[in-house]
Amino acid sequence: MSTPETVAAPRAVAMGGIPFWKRLRYRIEYAGLRFASALICLLPWRWIAPLADCVGSVFFTFDRHRREVTLANLHSAFGERYEDAEYQMIGRKSYGVFARTALELLWSPNLSNAALDEIITTEGLDPMPGHVAGGRPALYFCLHAGNFEWLSQITCRHFGNFPVIAQKLKNPLIGPLFDSWRSALGQEIMPQKGAMLRTIRHLKEGGKMGMLIDLNLKPSEGPVVIRQFGRLLTPVTRLPAELALRTGSALVPVECLPRQDGGYIVRYLPELSIPAGSNPGEIAQACWDALEPGLHKHPELWLWSYKHWRYRPGGVQGKGYPFYAGEYGPFQELIDGVKG
């Protein structure tokens, strides 16, 4: 579906105001993605997983910096739980999972309800839980794990279409492509401008929304600090917690797990019980705690190549963080504020 942004994007590049070399790069990126999607769409869906495993292995082998980040993250999260060879295997598989997610996003023009019936098995909706009821707002939240790109389209199949907030990218030509792939089954694309107010209105009217909860923010962006893997303090988005407090929405954890035949199991976990008087930090922590056990069972599913822990606290608390983490005054102030 189109938005004012998708209509204006090609015009914005053509009309100038952007250096020639950058306009050229934008058009090459756009053409490359269009070609890649057209090529991937020619493949049967079952070919994507083995292709992604191959692509992931190649990148894990040659992407030295991200490989170091991946392994450092795994060691920080799990300590001595695994041997070095096991960490290498988990990291390599994680690259394959992300490659598969990216390739399946490119394959999204082929998506249909019949295709989803073959690819997806759903758990946790029989009998139908209370958050499905018409007129009750709900936030379905997940991590960057498994095929998080398809989760909103899958959830819409059961609960009706809900808006997807458009991601603003530097290249104005690419954003509309991603919007079209993420709305392949008819979801509404909501521009980022004014999205907060529209989202609140949508939820107060009994709508449903999907969100990622492991989005790291800078301390200046108003995050809340949560504890991951028992000790790693992380500034994450407070948006799902704030929306739940303002609209009374149910908070429902969702997992995307591998199926033995190559498909996915989408599992809706029990709705969170939020005690009266809970603050956004406590709610954000409860959201993470609901999904972290899945990462212990299937560590390869998470996006370990991302720098999840850029900031570390000072003193003893800062031990065990990955090599790229650094002390940062505003982050320490956030932590001290939580303690206070």
Image (cartoon, rainbow, N blue to C red):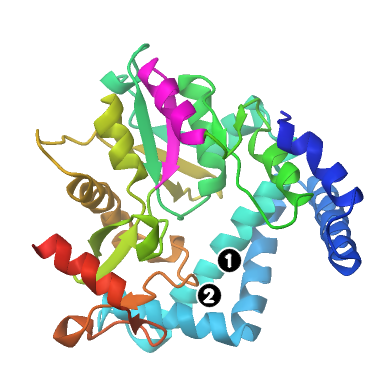
Tag 1–tag 2 contact (CB < 8 Å): yes
The tag on residue 96 is: 1
- Compared to 33, does 63 lie above or below? below
- State the SS at label 1: helix
- Compared to 149, does 333 lie above or below? below
Q: Nearer the viewer, residue 247 or 288?
A: 247
In the picture, measured across the screen, residue 140 lies left or right of residue 245, that is right
In the picture, measured across the screen, residue 313 lies left or right of residue 152, that is left
What is the three-letter code of the residue carrying label 2? Answer: Arg
Residue 31 at x, y = what percent? 88, 55
Residue 104 at x, y = what percent? 66, 49
Find residue 211 and report its image quarter: top left
What is the three-letter code of the residue carrying label 1? Answer: Gly
Magenta-highlighted residues: 195-212
Q: Residues within 10 Å of mark 2 (few under 14, many from 20)?
A: many
Q: Which residue is mark 2?
A: 92
Q: Residue at x 17, y 44 (%)?
A: 279
Find residue 280 and report its image quarter: top left
Q: Is residue 111 magenta?
A: no
Q: How many marks?
A: 2
Residue reaching furthest to the top: 134
- State the SS at label 2: helix
Q: Nearer the viewer, residue 132 or 218?
A: 218
Q: Residue at x 42, y 84 (%)?
A: 324
Residue 290 at x, y = what percent? 25, 48
Quadrant assignment for the N terminus: top right
The tag on residue 60 is: none
